[in-house]
Structures are given as structure tokens and as C-alpha cells.
Image (cartoon, rainbow, N blue to C red):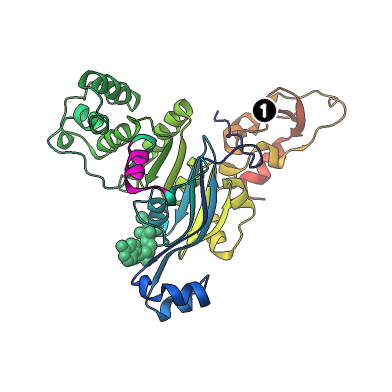
Amino acid sequence: MRQPPLINSKKTTPKLVCNAVWKIFGDFSKAAQVFDTQYWPPTQNELDKFNLIGAVQQASLEIYDGEIFVIMGLSGSGKSTLVRCMSRLIEPTRGEILFNGQDLLKKSNKEMIEIRRHKMGMVFQHFALLPHLSVLGNVAFPLEVQGISRQQREARAMEVIELVGLKGRENYLPRELSGGQQQRVGIARSLAVEPELWFLDEPFSALDPLIRREMQDEFLRLQNLLRKTIVFITHDFDEAIRLADRIAIMKDGHIVQIGTPEDIVLRPATDYVSEFTRDVSRAKVLHVSSIMQPAPKRTPKGGYGGTILQSAKINAIAAQLKSASKPFAVIDEDENIVGKITRDDIIDVLFEG
Ligand SMILES: Nc1ncnc2c1ncn2[C@@H]1O[C@H](COP(=O)(O)OP(=O)(O)O)[C@@H](O)[C@H]1O
Ligand SMILES: [Mg+2]
């Protein structure tokens, strides 16, 4: 079972911070002075008046070491623009981006290229594999760019090819692979440099639902091994709640809510967010800890039917409690009893109480 990363904003420096980031498309330079002196931060009306597009507006977030941070929003809500601002593939118009506490906007272009090459990995929905290079050549390519020797880069490439389940196909050309396999090559290629920060922009959106699901499982398996810090973009709310430690929901350039899947489903901040959460099965997102009852002082008369972890999701333990006549003890990771839960508690959630 996946353990949530430790998130403690007071003790850990976030891996990445966005502070009031803006990206305005259109001819902003002409209007910049007026905006900075009179209209900052601008309203949608003010942007419209000058024919400007506020693709990202006042976006602030913190991403912590080892978490999967999902940015979810409909098409056009500003997800790709925001994620590109994080690596300065797109220059933010205003705001601050901190990577390991360092201000990225103060880095020269040359420094940014080095940071991207060595510390960041990127996977896009439609990224081009090099068609004339084999799987091995494609995966080793970013290492070649780094100037790593052939022997070393191919050894490393073989490791990641095996990691993503493509061992045996290292000499295939991209066109000899299925869509899902090509996406695995892209994933392997982005992992070859061992990025500190891994960006994936709708990596599975073009795949068929069954393959997409398989890739999501595969992605979670990889993350369990690698513990990367990940920014994952999707327009699919189900994908978001399956993968995310935390989700930021975007609408019209704004971040409207940031929270764990459970937070968002239980406490949607706006009607817009409620629309997404309405059809989500609560059993998929709720943990035992959010529906358990307080632990009784003494063990119940008939004893417990068994124990379950407080961090388990309801859908994962439903079968176990389906025919239980006794309550189960809820335990924490150190096996202390922290609550109890009954079959009826589970049924309430399953039938959306
Ligand atoms: N290079 C650009 N020039 C002008 N407008 C752009 C550009 N790139 C994106 N936009 C606009 O910015 C908004 C956000 O786009 P994008 O970040 O691609 O959204 P998403 O990834 O959520 O689909 C959209 O309205 C889009 O049309
Ligand atoms: Mg996009």
C-alpha cells in the first residue's frame, strides 16, 4: 500500500513553489505599465479590454518532495501553460518560481538549460520519439546530450527500459510499437536522467481506456519504487483521484482548490469543483480513518472481527467487512488501535449514505 509522503510546510522546504504566477498571452508589453500601476492584479474585464489572455492567473502552490501533485482542469484552463512556466519553457509574465528554494526567474538561459537537462524530466501527450532511433537510442538520447559515454548511457538506458517493462524490445523502432509501448519509451527516456522533478502533461490522455488504466497502475508502481517529485497533468478527474497525493483544480487560469482527493470530494470549494466530484464513488477516495468510530476504551464483548489499517481506502476493505458480524479494530502503522469500524459504516459509504 502506498504511504502518503510527509508533508510539513514548516519543516521541509518544498521542492517547487509558485507564488502568484501569471502568464498573459497577447501583446502585454504595451499595456504592462498601465497594468502594473493601475490594474494589478487585473480582473478578467481588464484583460479583455486589452485583448489579453490570462492563461494562468495568480497561481500559488507548493509541491513537496516525493509527492504526486496533480493539476486537473478542463481543456483550456491553463494547465499546460502553468507546468511550462515551472520549467520556464514558457516565461511567466509575473510571479515567482522557486526550485529547491532558488528563484528560477533569476537564472540565465544557460543555467535553465542545465537545470532542465539534469534535474527535470518531461513527458507530453504527443512527444516525438526519434523515429530513426531504436528504443535504446531514444532512451539513451538525453544522456548523450549530457555527454555521457556510450557504454554508460546504454547501461543506464537498459536499466530504465527494464523498469518500464520493455526489456527485449530495446532494438525496436518506435513505429514497431503500440501507442502504450511508445508512451513507456517516453517515460523511460524522461527517467533516464534521474530527474528531481518529473513533469507529465496528459501522458495517458491519448490512450484507450483499458491501456490508460494499465499505464496508471504502472505509473503508481514506478512511483512506489522511485519516489519522485511529480507534477502530473490531466483533464480526467478519475485519473486525478487515482494518482494524486494532492490535486490542484484549475478553471479559467485560476487555481480554485488544492487538496487531497479526499478533501476535494468531501469538501469541494466551489460549485465548479462539486460538478467533478458528484459522480465519484466515495469509497474510492475515503480512508478508513475518515469514517471510523472512536476506539472503545475496552475491547468489545465479542472481540474484534479483525484489524484494518486506518490508511486503507474503503473500496479496498469492503469485501473483508461485507459479511463481518463483529466490528473491526482500526489500527495505525504502528498497530495501535485508533478506532473501530462496523459493516454498517462501510455500507453507508458504499450506498453513498
Ligand atoms: N502561445 C499561446 N498564445 C496565445 N494563447 C495561448 C497560447 N498558449 C495557450 N494559450 C491559451 O491559454 C489558455 C490556456 O491554455 P493551456 O495552458 O494550453 O490549457 P490546458 O493545458 O489546460 O488545455 C487557452 O485559452 C489557450 O488558448
Ligand atoms: Mg494542455
Structural crowding at the residue carrying mark 1, measured as other residues with C-alpha within 10 Å and reported as few (<14), some (14–19) or many (≥20): many
Q: Residue at x 27, y 26 (%)?
A: 166
Secondary element type, mark 1: strand
| Apparent side of residue 52 relative to residue 144 in the rendered image (left or right) | right
User: What is the residue that sits farthest to the bottom in this orientation?
Assistant: 49
Does the image show residue 36? yes
Left or right relative to 242: residue 341: right
Q: Quadrant of residue 198?
A: top left
Label total for image: 1
Q: What segment carries the magenta color?
A: 107-117
Quarter of the figure that contains the N terminus: top right
Residue farthest right in this picture:
297
Residue 136 x, y percent position in the rendering: 21, 27
Whether the magenta-drawn stretch holds residue 35 is answered as: no
Q: For the point 71% across and 22% down, which residue is it?
A: 335
- Residue 280 shows in this picture: no
Left/right placement of residue 80 relative to residue 66 reads left
What residue sits 17% from the left and 38% below the top? Answer: 130
Of the pair 281 and 179, the residue shown nearer to us: 179
Q: Which residue is mark 1?
A: 308
Type of residue at label 1? Answer: Ile
Which quarter is ligand 2 in?
bottom left
Q: Is residue 295 above or below residue 241?
A: above
- Residue 325 place in picture, x, y as percent: 73, 30
